Image (cartoon, rainbow, N blue to C red):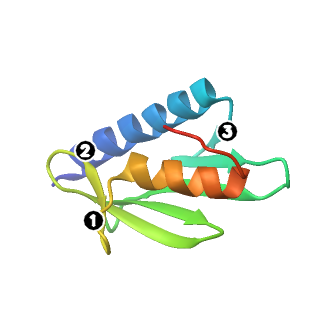
Amino acid sequence: MQDKEFSDLAEAALRRIEAALDAAGVDCEQASGGVLEIEFADDSRIVVNRHGAAREIWVAARAGGFHFHWDGAVWRDTRDKAELFAKLSQLVSQQAGEPVTL
């Protein structure tokens, strides 16, 4: 995958995540450099960012760090092959203490 393709795909994913979080009523803020911070009532955060060198989207949450690679159709966790939005729904739900579907 070329740099431009990765950048376009990652930016689209971050915009989609931000829109889904807004629709779910979860606070988030996109910072410069392709970083999305999801904030919770207990002052904890989940950070989602694109990592250009690895051509991955990285997620840092209380439950750990996760790397997602584009498989040609969706972003998949490099370890368990979970889809990005499914995994993020799980992580946000855990940290929010209530079900959140993205």
User: Distance from label 2 to label 1 (Cα)?
Assistant: 24 Å
Depth check, front residue: 73 or 35: 73
Q: Nearer the viewer, mark 1 or mark 3?
A: 1
**Real-space CA distance between mark 1 and mark 3, rounded to the nearest whole angstrom:** 27 Å
Give the residue at mark 1: 81
Is 27 above or below relative to 74? above
| Callout 2 amino acid | Lys
Q: Residue at x 15, y 55 (%)?
A: 1
Where residue 74 appears, as percent x and y from the top left, is: 24, 47
State the residue in front, 61 or 6: 61
Q: Is residue 37 above or below residue 8?
A: below
Q: Please give the name of the residue rendered at 60% of the width and 51% of the height, measured from the top-left corner.
A: 92
Q: Are marks 2 and 1 in contact (CB under 8 Å)?
A: no
Foreground disc of the pair 2, 1: 1
Element carrying mark 1:
loop
Which circle marks residue 47 in the picture?
none
Q: Residues within 10 Å of mark 2 (few under 14, many from 20)?
A: few
Q: Residue at x 57, y 65 (%)?
A: 60
Q: Residue 2 placed where, x, y %?
A: 17, 52
- Residue 80: give x, y in percent of width and height: 31, 71
Residue 12 image offset from top left, x and y in percent: 37, 35
Q: Bin the neighbour count of mark 3 within 10 Å (Cα to Cα): few under 14, some 14-19, many 20 and up.
A: some
Element at badge 3? strand
Type of amino acid at the residue the image marks with label 3:
Glu
Q: Which residue is mark 2?
A: 4
Residue under circle 3?
29
* Residue 33 seen anywhere in this rendered image of the structure: no
Which quadrant would residue 18 be assigned to in this image?
top right
User: Which comes sooner in the sequence, label 2 or label 3?
Assistant: 2
Question: Which of marks 1 and 2 precedes in the sequence?
Answer: 2
Q: Give the secondary structure at mark 2.
A: helix
